[in-house]
Image: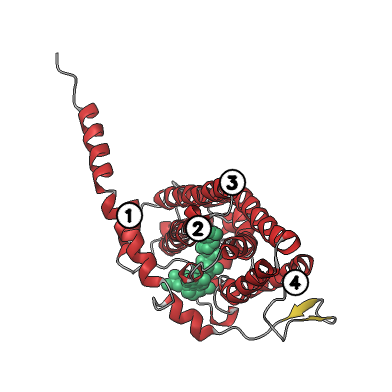
Amino acid sequence: LRSAQELQLQQRFDARIDAGEFIEARDWMPENYRKTLVRQISQHAHSEIVGMLPEGNWITRAPTLKRKAILLAKVQDEGGHGLYLYSAAETLGTSRDEMLAALHSGRAKYSSIFNYPTLTWADVGVIGWLVDGAAIMNQVPICRCSYGPYARAMVRICREESFHQRQGYEALLTMMQRGTDAQRAMVQDAVNRWWWPSLMMFGPPDELSPNTAQSMRWGIKRISNDELRQKFVDAAVQQAQVLGVQLPDPDLKWNEERGQHDFGAIDWDEFWRVVGGDGPCNRERLAARVKAWDDGAWVREAALAHAAKHAEPQRA
Ligand code: FAQ
């Protein structure tokens, strides 16, 4: 049985959520609200950090110095996003070490999309267009999330993601409009491979999404998985036309009555396989993160030794 005081705190919390107020780190919050936020924000942070790997694969092979400089900056931005998000999650009382230990031991999730390989340079452009495009569609509503530190981190992240999306689209436009037939075919092949995994980024269908109802009640999620996926499809169709690529779905067509596009069935078995650790690159991605953590041990030790030295009282 809950105490009268706890019930009062709960009622006050619910009223603040209903009034659209931000909840801040020191405010009282239900334990499950805290747990849900740590789960989502840490998974989001892990996605940003693991998400550096597929594109990082092309830094040494970018076709021009300009493209290389852009890609370096983009991958570095993703690292920055991961750091803001770990900081936002830390305000809820979970340490970064705990979150990273969960990632490295395979207990924590990160976005399924980063378990697919980047086979050609066109994949880098398609990640910008479709993957960053899907990320923005999902993340703009999180700028209005009820937890203040997460919402504020998302404002800057979304600005940077929208720049990333444009650079990816521009790289593809260059290949489609000024490239060779082989380059155009490379773009189409990359679109064929990334389209369906991009739709999976929004998560399972609403009726099979265990967290949506409660997260929407708490104002953590503002728009459901299926609604966001639909908005993404509608936006991508026009962008594909301008680019001159086909989206690989024979069932994709405008539905006059709904005022939206119908689209084909998503392979949810594939999605759950990848989420469960058995996608094309899951093992490679996790191994790369664990190696980076192990290789960085000396930096963490040196920083701690330095901090300890400065914390010592000054000797006369
Ligand atoms: N992959 O009940 P729901 C980026 C899990 S963008 C893996 O619907 P929820 C930028 C879900 O965690 C990518 N797992 O869950 C970038 C849950 O499992 P759990 C990251 C997934 O939380 C671009 C279970 O399935 N963006 O990094 C996925 O209400 C380019 C049931 O699902 C974010 O994280 C998936 N795709 O909704 C970087 C955005 N979908 O935890 C580099 C913030 C679902 O109960 C290069 N997150 N699951 O064991 C969200 O908006 C939400 O967490 C959703 C899932 C929409 C992802």
The one of 232 and 278 positioned closer to us in this rendering: 278
Please report whichever mark, 2 or 1, sits nearer to the chain's N-terminal start.
Answer: 2
Distance of label 1 from label 3 (alpha carbons): 26 Å
Please report whichever mark, 1 or 3, sits nearer to the chain's N-terminal start.
Answer: 3
- Which numbered disc covers residue 292? 1
The residue wearing badge 3 is 156
Please report whichever mark, 4 or 3, sits nearer to the chain's N-terminal start.
Answer: 3
| 294 left or right, relative to 117 | left
The residue wearing badge 4 is 237
Q: Amino acid at mark 3?
A: Arg
Distance of label 2 from label 1 (alpha carbons): 18 Å
Question: Circles 2 and 3: CB distance less than 8 Å?
Answer: no
Please report whichever mark, 2 or 3, sits nearer to the chain's N-terminal start.
Answer: 2
Q: Is residue 95 visible?
A: no
Q: Quadrant of residue 136?
A: bottom right
**Residue 231 position (above or below residue 79):** below
**Residue 77 position (above or below residue 1):** above
Q: Residues within 10 Å of mark 1 (few under 14, many from 20)?
A: few
**Residue 123 position (above or below residue 77):** below
Q: Amino acid at mark 1?
A: Ala
| 257 left or right, relative to 224 | right
Give the mark toward the camera: 2 or 1: 2
Distance of label 2 from label 3 (alpha carbons): 25 Å
The one of 168 and 103 positioned closer to us in this rendering: 168
Please report whichever mark, 2 or 4, sits nearer to the chain's N-terminal start.
Answer: 2
Q: Quadrant of residue 248?
A: bottom right
The residue wearing badge 2 is 58
The one of 91 and 53 positioned closer to us in this rendering: 53
Distance of label 4 from label 3 (alpha carbons): 27 Å
Q: Quadrant of residue 189?
A: bottom right
Question: Circles 2 and 1: CB distance less than 8 Å?
Answer: no
Distance of label 2 from label 4 (alpha carbons): 27 Å
